[in-house]
Image (tube, grey):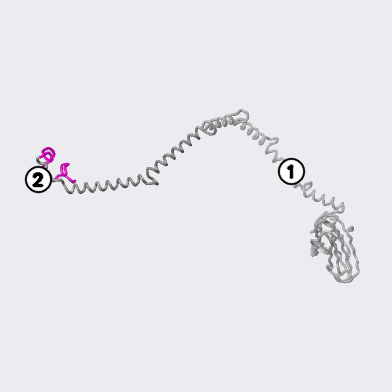
Amino acid sequence: MWFDGGFPWDKSDSECFPDKCMSNPCHKDKCIPDKQFLMKLVKCLCILKRELEQCEKILCNPKFGLKEIKSEVKQIEVNVETILEVIFSPTFGLREIKTEVAGIEDAIFSPTFGLQEIKSEVAGIEDAVFSPTFGLQEIKSEVAGIEDAVFSPTFGLQEIKTEIIEILANQGIAPYLSTGPFFVDCLEQTLHLKVLNYTTSSQSVNFIIHSLANCPITIGAITVPLINIPPCCAAFVEVPLPGEGERNLEIRAELSAASQGILIYAATKTGLPNCQGTKVNEFKHAEWAPLTTFCG
């Protein structure tokens, strides 16, 4: 502590006591102040002054001082006023919100289109869905019946397609045509094939030559394709006849479409392909037999 007994005075003089110094004027000249205490007091005052100056700087700061605080307080007041205006607005304030909430409540509890009516309609839908006569179970049963009918081997899609092919064949329109079996002698060496496209789109025909000596006839079959024949154009080719000597053959034509506008022709001749020879067998378009089924 700076002093003893609560008084900052030098007690070296035995005649100087606190009560004498304070009450008896005759002893005041003998009471000497404590210099060390005074220096500390001055230092404290300097520190206090510096702190006060720092406080003044903070208070007068343009960014966060009193002026800025007052500005922000004013802005808060403006915001509060705006909020109050919104809250008490007759068009979208609390009163209007309460009105709309009341309207929602009326709609929810309406006996004609509210929750009760919705629940009633949902119950009706559930009854319909789970009905044993026309609900999901019955629908699934009917769908299963349709699937059985569609995939039936006797009257399903496969049988329908077969019958359609037969109908087209009976009308002379089929995607598969055949020369039927024919005989080739030793002199016949070349097969001449021809396609005339009278349709409005490009067409293709695959000629397949079968040797009837093979069983099944698909063994060793030779395919001669004539592809992408433009509309109103023809394509032809000559190929060697398979085998040697006397033999029995059949030529099948697979058309890209069942159309009366695709005309085909085949002929056998003596001599090598693309060389002079004599025509022997000839199969004009009208002589080709339509196929409802085929091998291979």
Q: Position of residue 265 (x, y in %)?
A: 87, 62
Q: In the image, is residue 6 part of the stretch drawn in magenta?
A: yes
As displayed, is residue 268 above or below residue 114?
A: below
Mark closer to the observer (2, 1): 2
Gap between marks 2 and 1 measured at Cα = 130 Å
Q: Position of residue 104 (x, y in %)?
A: 57, 32
Residue range corresponding to the magenta coloring: 1-25
Please state which of residues 6 and 121 is positioned toward the viewer in this rendering.
Answer: 6
Task: Name the residue that disc number 2 marks.
Answer: 13
Amino acid under disc 1: Ile
Q: In the image, is residue 83 part of the stretch drawn in magenta?
A: no
Task: Name the residue that disc number 1 marks.
Answer: 146
Q: Position of residue 221 (x, y in %)?
A: 80, 64
Q: Secondary structure at mark 1?
A: helix
Q: Taking the image as drawn, is residue 221 in sight?
A: no
Please state which of residues 135 and 35 is positioned toward the viewer in this rendering.
Answer: 35
